[in-house]
Structures are given as C-alpha cells and as structure tokens.
Image (cartoon, rainbow, N blue to C red):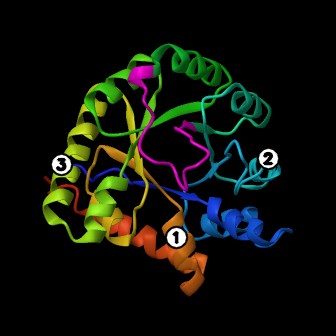
Amino acid sequence: MPAPAPIRLGVNIDHVATVRNARGGHHPDPVRAARIAIAAGADGITAHLREDRRHIVDDDIVRLKASIQKPLNLEMAATGEMVEIARKVRPHAACLVPERRQERTTEGGLDVAGQRESLRGVVGELSAMGIRVSMFIAAEPAQIEAAAAVGAPVIEIHTGTWSEAVAAGDAAAAAAEFARIARGAALATVNGLEVHAGHGLDFVTAEKIAQRAEIVELNIGHFLVGEAIFDGLDAAVRKMRAAMDRGRAKSRTAS
C-alpha cells in the first residue's frame, strides 16, 4: 500500500490581529506571526478579512501577500466588496464563509445549497482571476453536492461541532460527528473535490482527523495563538505539525 500523501497545515493568524487591535498600534504584527509559522512548518497562511475589520484589516492582507513565501488563503464573505479586494490582492486561495456581524467566530458552514446561483457567480469571478476557491461547509451531502455544482474545486469541512463534543467528553456525540465528517470527506472526493477541514481543532483532534486520507489540509488558528501565549508560536506550530504527521502516518489503517 503506498504511503499516505502528506497533509498540509494552514495557520490562521486572525487572532494575532485581535490582540493588536485590542490596544491599537502595530504590535503584535500578524505578518511577523505568519513568517514565524511558516518557518516552523506551516504550508500556508489563512486570514479572514471581515466586513467589520474586527481583527485582520486590509493592509494586513496586502502586506501578507507581498511578504510571505507560502500560499495566502483569504477567508471572505461572498460579497462584491470582498471580490474586489481579492481582485486587487490576488491571494492564492479564497475560502468563502458565512458571516454575521454579531457572531464571535464563524458559526456553522455556508449554505451553498440555498445560494447556488449567487455563489456560482462569485466562484466564477474568483476562478477567472486564477484564485483557488473553497467553500466552508458542514459535512452534509446537500452542501457538498452543491459546492461541486457551483464549480468550487475545494471544500473545507467545518469541524467545530466535533471538536466541541471531544472537548466536552461526550464520546457518543463525538463519534457520531466524526463519522459524519468521514462520510462527507469520502463523498466530496467522489465528487472530485479537494477536501480541507478546520475550526476548533487542537493537538488531539488534529492528530485524529489527519488519519482521514481524503483530507489534505487543516486550517487552524485560535488554538495555536492561544498556545503561543504559553509556549511561543514557533513551538506551538511545530507541535501541531508533529501531531498531524503522527495522525497521517496512521492513515493506512484508519477506518
């Protein structure tokens, strides 16, 4: 049996900007954090430019694109404003996410099935710019099939519900949700989609989900920034990279 393909780590640096914005000024700089993460083993950097600019701001995106030597994944709402920003900056990838101003973090996945026509246009515009488009969705068949139908080459499966069940010690709920994720990843692969995953992952859950050979990338942010307070960002990213690699090594026998 061939060795499993490596799994990529995308580090989300949004909450470095959250700390900066709490006081104003320029410190800590999310671009510096991105460079540290890349040096420690990150395969790319993710940043979410929200409508209200609560953490990442426009200048961060411009500087990230100009400064880092790895792919930049721009998380964005499917709005005209964000499409125009993507047109100017030309990130490697754009992940379309749901966005509500009152939420603290992205809650749930994008309803692709209910917005097919509008999302088809956004996917087409971004793809025409040479930007790889992904859809941040729940592992539901209708959403996965809709993502394929609108022309998105990639999905990112929302892992928040599973991560929360694991953290709460609810083994039954965690097992059920992980099975749903696994079925979704398999269905996406059958539909020709590249599969990523993210939201709420820590060292334990990242190692576990890395065993799913269909999943080729994890995007992780808040947990790593939190761990960086205690151990430093370099150490946190290296520890995450090692956890993911351990999980991937087990993927030959994962069920």
| SS category of the residue bearing label 2 | helix
> In this picture, is 37 found above or below 179?
below
Q: Residue at x 45, y 34 (%)?
A: 110
Q: Where on the picture, by quarter, is residue 248? A: bottom left
Q: Amino acid at mark 1?
A: Leu
Q: Is residue 248 visible?
A: no
Given residues 161 and 59, the one toward you in this image is 161
The disc at residue 224 is: 1
Q: Earlier in the sequence, mark 3 or mark 1?
A: 3
Q: Amino acid at mark 3?
A: Ala
Question: Is residue 250 found left or right of 228 in the rendered image?
Answer: left
Residue at image mark 2? 58
Label 3 and label 1: CA atoms lie apart by 25 Å
> In this picture, is 146 found above or below 195?
above
Question: Is residue 32 found left or right of 161 in the rendered image?
Answer: right
What is the magenta range? Answer: 95-114
> In this picture, is 177 found above or below 113?
below
Crowding near the residue tagged with mark 3, few <14, some 14–19, many ≥20 C-alpha atoms within 10 Å: some
| SS category of the residue bearing label 1 | helix
Magenta region, main secondary structure: loop
Q: Where on the picture, by quarter, is residue 96? A: top right
Given residues 201 and 1, the one toward you in this image is 201
Q: Residue at x 47, y 25 (%)?
A: 152
Q: Are marks 1 and 2 in contact (CB under 8 Å)?
A: no
Residue at image mark 3? 179
